Image (spheres, helix red, strand yellow):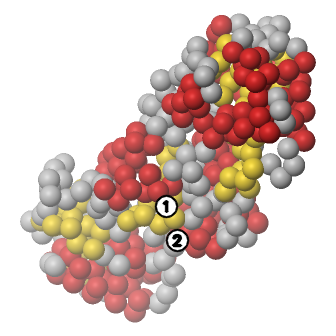
């Protein structure tokens, strides 16, 4: 295995699609810093409840009787809840009730919101994972307990149902909701890019974003093609198991960081993409295939989509002669055999070494791998 040139960033030559709403810029900046090209297609947006009747009713239920535990899943949601209660003249009463309960925070932002309200949390998982928080509650024993769960944009059926199955009474506290993007155009174009082979990885930071992406594909008749691309070609990374659930339901494999953090997610994407990059030696040159480029003897060579598709097909079985007819099926938009010849010519130019790809008369093409 050849080592990557230290001058080439770990994600150079890769294109990553981002569907997140919150923290999209932060994730994008981390990936760009590693050399990736980033394309944004927000799949969701956060909106406050248009009618706060549900939130008011949930708050009233919590104030009617003592509550044993309160789960804060997001900082923005917890703050919005307290601010809404203040607007109803119930702020002090709510804080007093929360102060007598066991407070649990999913991550540092929820923890910060709790402390900003003059309260303190009793538990917050190091992984910032809803799944770890749930396991902590279940291990502690929740039978007969009354637990309030501040929702973060959509119902948390697995989380809530698990608590109820274990014998708890659960009060769901909806503060804001995830809805589809105001402009679906960027997401639509991002899906097209995935299907065209121009996207190498899709990291997801929330289950709603994953579900909304799949829903857009389903509505536009592209779900089967998207599932195939995400299963066999595109790296799919999720910040945690709950985020991965909508994808796992369709059999889409995912990679996940050990800790549910944005920085860890970016590192996982980089490590997984580099690990799955084919490496070979041809015509005396060391070659590493990136998503949208190739590294030849430590030099990054940008390659257009059609020539890159041909290179991947040739590298799938290095040294085997691949016919022009086979290579037409590898082209992003198909085409005639002359399109293959054009792509081969462009590939040789991009790689800077014509000997890397050999023409086998009347049979096709092969990489000049050393046997």
Q: Position of residue 23 (x, y in %)?
A: 51, 50
Name the residue located 90 percent from the left edge and 18 percent from the top edge: 64
Q: Is residue 115 left or right of residue 177?
A: left
Q: Position of residue 223 (x, y in %)?
A: 68, 62
Frontmost residue, 322 versus 244: 244
Give the residue at the far bottom of this rendering: 338
Which quarter of the rendered picture does the C terminus lie within? bottom left
Q: Is residue 181 left or right of residue 295?
A: right
Q: Give the labeled residue for mark 1.
A: 17
Q: Quadrant of residue 343?
A: bottom left
* Number of other residues with Cα within 10 Å of mark 2, as a class: few under 14, some 14 to 19, many 20 or more: some
136, above or below 224, in the image:
above
Q: Quadrant of residue 308?
A: bottom left
Frontmost residue, 364 versus 97: 97
**Of circles 1 and 2, which is in front?**
1
Secondary structure beneath label 2: helix
Q: Position of residue 61 (x, y in %)?
A: 89, 24
Name the residue located 75 percent from the left edge and 50 percent from the top edge: 48
Can you see residue 236?
Answer: no
104, above or below 301, in the image:
above
Name the residue located 73 percent from the left edge and 70 percent from the top edge: 220
260, above or below 37, in the image:
above
Q: Give the labeled residue for mark 2.
A: 193
* Number of other residues with Cα within 10 Å of mark 1, as a class: few under 14, some 14 to 19, many 20 or more: many
Frontmost residue, 293 versus 334: 293
Q: Is residue 231 left or right of residue 177?
A: left
Q: Are marks 1 and 2 in contact (CB under 8 Å)?
A: yes
Of labels 1 and 2, earlier in sequence is 1
């Amino acid at each position: 295995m050849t080592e990557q040139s230290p001058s080439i960033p770990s994600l150079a030559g890769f294109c990553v699609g981002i569907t997140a709403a919150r923290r999209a810029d932060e994730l994008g900046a981390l990936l760009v810093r590693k050399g990736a090209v980033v394309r944004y297609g927000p799949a969701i947006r956060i909106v406050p409840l248009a009618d706060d009747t549900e939130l008011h009713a949930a708050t009233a239920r919590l104030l009617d009787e003592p509550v044993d535990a309160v789960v804060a899943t997001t900082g923005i949601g917890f703050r919005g809840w307290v601010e809404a209660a203040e607007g109803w003249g119930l702020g002090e009463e709510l804080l007093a009730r929360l102060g007598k309960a066991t407070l649990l925070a999913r991550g540092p932002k929820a923890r910060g919101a709790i402390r900003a309200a003059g309260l303190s949390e009793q538990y917050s998982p190091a992984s910032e994972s809803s799944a770890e928080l749930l396991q902590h509650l279940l291990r502690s024993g929740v039978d007969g307990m009354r637990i309030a769960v501040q929702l973060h944009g959509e119902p948390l059926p697995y989380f809530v149902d698990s608590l109820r199955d274990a014998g708890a009474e659960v009060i769901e506290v909806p503060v804001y909701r995830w809805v589809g993007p105001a402009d679906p155009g960027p997401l639509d174009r991002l899906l097209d890019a995935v299907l065209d082979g121009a996207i190498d990885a899709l990291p997801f930071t929330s289950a709603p974003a994953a579900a909304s992406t799949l829903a857009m594909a389903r509505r536009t008749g592209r779900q089967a093609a998207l599932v195939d691309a995400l299963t066999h070609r595109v790296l799919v990374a999720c910040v945690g198991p709950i985020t991965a659930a909508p994808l796992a339901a369709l059999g889409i494999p995912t990679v996940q960081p050990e800790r549910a953090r944005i920085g860890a997610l970016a590192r996982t994407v980089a490590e997984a993409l580099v690990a799955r990059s084919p490496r070979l030696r041809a015509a005396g040159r060391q070659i590493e295939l990136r998503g949208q480029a190739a590294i030849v003897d430590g030099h990054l060579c940008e390659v257009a989509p059609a020539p890159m598709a041909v290179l991947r097909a040739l590298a799938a079985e290095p040294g085997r002669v691949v016919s022009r007819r086979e290579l037409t099926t590898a082209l992003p938009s198909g085409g005639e055999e002359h399109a293959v010849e054009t792509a081969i010519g462009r590939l040789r130019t991009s790689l800077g070494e014509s000997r890397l790809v050999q023409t086998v008369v009347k049979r096709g093409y092969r990489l000049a791998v050393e046997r």
